[in-house]
Amino acid sequence: MHLLKNIAVISSSVILIVSVLISADRYSISSSKSAEVCLSCHEDESLTMEKGGKTISIYVNPAEYQNSVHAGADCADCHLGYNPDEIPHSKSIQKVNCGSCHDDTKGLENSVHSKVNCADCHSKHGIKPVKEIAENQTESCLGCHKGKSIRQFSTSIHNKKNTGCNGCHSGGHDVKNIQKQEVTTVCGKCHSESKMKFSNSIHTTLTKAGNKITPICTDCHGSHQILTSKYSIESEACLKCHLDEKQFPGESKGSAKFVAEYKTSIHAGLKGETESAGCTDCHGNHMIKDPNDPGSSVSRYKLTETCAKCHREIAEEFKKSSHGKALNDKNISAPTCVSCHNEHSIKSVPFSNELSKLNQVETCLKCHEEGKLPYKNYKGEEELISNYKDSYHYKALQEGKFDAATCSDCHGAHSMAKFDDPNSHVYKKNIAMTCGKSNCHTKELSEFEGSVHNISIMKNENSDAPTCTNCHGNHQILNKDETGNRIASSKGVIQLCSDCHNSVELNEKYDLPTGRTSSYLDSYHGLAVRGGSKLAADCGSCHGNHDIKASTDSASSISKNNLAKTCGNCHPGVEATFFQTKIHIVDKRADAPGVWWVTLIYLLLIFGTIGVMVFHNILDIRKKAAERQTE
């Protein structure tokens, strides 16, 4: 009995040991098949199966799997429902459920990827570490998102700066689409300064007021391509909106037609395939203000500095000019850059342009025409600038002579200043240089520089000596032979010179010889001119026109050494005694005693004869009256 019990115990133990060994062997075989055994078949690249009426590959790259983070996991950990002993395997296959191991997928169910298979991002068997996926997220995302606009991300500034998709769309599993109202906030996470500026712009102001078409970051920069070049931004963004006549109707400032003028401007002209100046150069990029806002870069009193970003030297000239000073003093009539050059339709200066020499006067007359801002010359006398249209200069321009002077040639384009400013082109000391600059009256300037008139002006800017405009006028400068020109006739020349030289005040002030005008008028030359002669000598015939010098100057046309040549211009071949005779005879008894005695005797004879005749007639009348009484 005892023996039977021992045999039973031994038998049970053997059975238990065998069972354990068999179970252990079976477990070992199963584990092996989940990796090496599985790959023994699935490493065949031609291995396929039928599923859903389609032939699909069930090839697994061994190297890819062995280098993945799942290399230590068994195939059966993910692929449930397979019977490894059956070939082909059972068809009661369960869908791979990553969540059975990975419970860190928070947010995935609410993300745009909620219906996306994990393998689409992580791959099936070559699963990489999260860090490696993050470093190559752009490549991973573009594997699915192949739209043209999205694929442009690979060339964008964000990609170049290693800002991946997760930077905007959130990281990990909580991937989101970005709503329009969220864009500024998302961009502001990195671009905080730009966000701050944009929040104070007219675009944001309009958005807050309920305007649904005002732009956000992506409207200007794009969503994925991310434009940074001002030229691309303007062509893609600013003009895309601001040329829309439905949004900006009409023809007033701010309208689409008004903005369209930019397309033909010099700023839009290509220089090396780039615009000279784009929208953002003038209006700013993020903090764009209403032009009427004092803080706007194109507001009336900030415009000069805006233009100065490119035109620094010109802007500095303008600020020193009478226009610039008036603008700085907040004079509402003072012009700004756009007053002359316009706003969007700024062009270079060809003949047809509003600022061309021919039409420039119209631009200036917009302010300076009759009744608006009349011009006062250095004597304080008011003139009308519109008289320029009657001048020889303007008529010459109309005939195509573009060297003729217009407003900016005399006053300066940007440096115009009042007549009493020493830096002014029309300051009395500077007038001759202005008139005589290159391509204008250079010959006349070289003559005038050594004249008594110019020497007096250079010594004292308050001198009463005449300069160019005293004789020729300011704006209504006429052609030499034109009716109305004071120097067109000898009578006019004499009167012109007499205006100064007949003045007792000026003669005493500058110690000039007196009686020169009256003595000339009493001379043969003067009498002949007064009688209508066009050949008799006037002031300029002897003294010159621009190069008038003192008689003591050896270069003077009336110097004793030069009289033969001067007089010979009208009287060729005369003897020396001819031109030694005084022309301006003021004191005849001292200067020409013979003439004085002849004149005296002549007058005595005339008045004596007349007196005798009068006395005779009186006696005759009395005699006849007495005879009538006696009768």
Image (cartoon, helix red, strand yellow):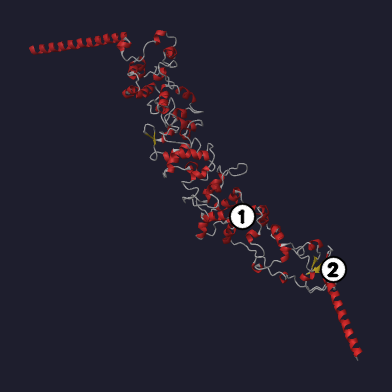
Q: Is residue 129 above or below residue 100?
A: above
Most foreground residue, 540 or 85: 85
Q: Residue furthest left?
A: 630
Disc nearer the start of the sequence (1/2):
2
Q: Quadrant of the N terminus?
A: bottom right
Kind of residue indicated by mark 2:
Val
Residue that label 1 marks: 222
Counting the numbered discs, the total is: 2
Marks 1 and 2, Cα distance to the nearest angstrom?
A: 52 Å
Kind of residue indicated by mark 1:
Gly
Among the 4 quarters of the image, the one containing residue 515: top left
- For numbered disc 2, what is the local secondary structure? helix
Q: Is residue 354 visible?
A: no
Among the 4 quarters of the image, the one containing residue 333: top left
Residue lying at 35% horizontally and 20% vertically, measured from the top left: 512
- In percent of width and height, residue 245 lies at 54, 53
Residue that label 2 marks: 37
Residue lying at 52% horizontally and 40% vertically, measured from the top left: 312
Crowding at dot 2, Cα within 10 Å, few <14 / some 14-19 / many 20+, comes out as some
524 left or right, relative to 25:
left
Q: Is residue 224 visible?
A: yes
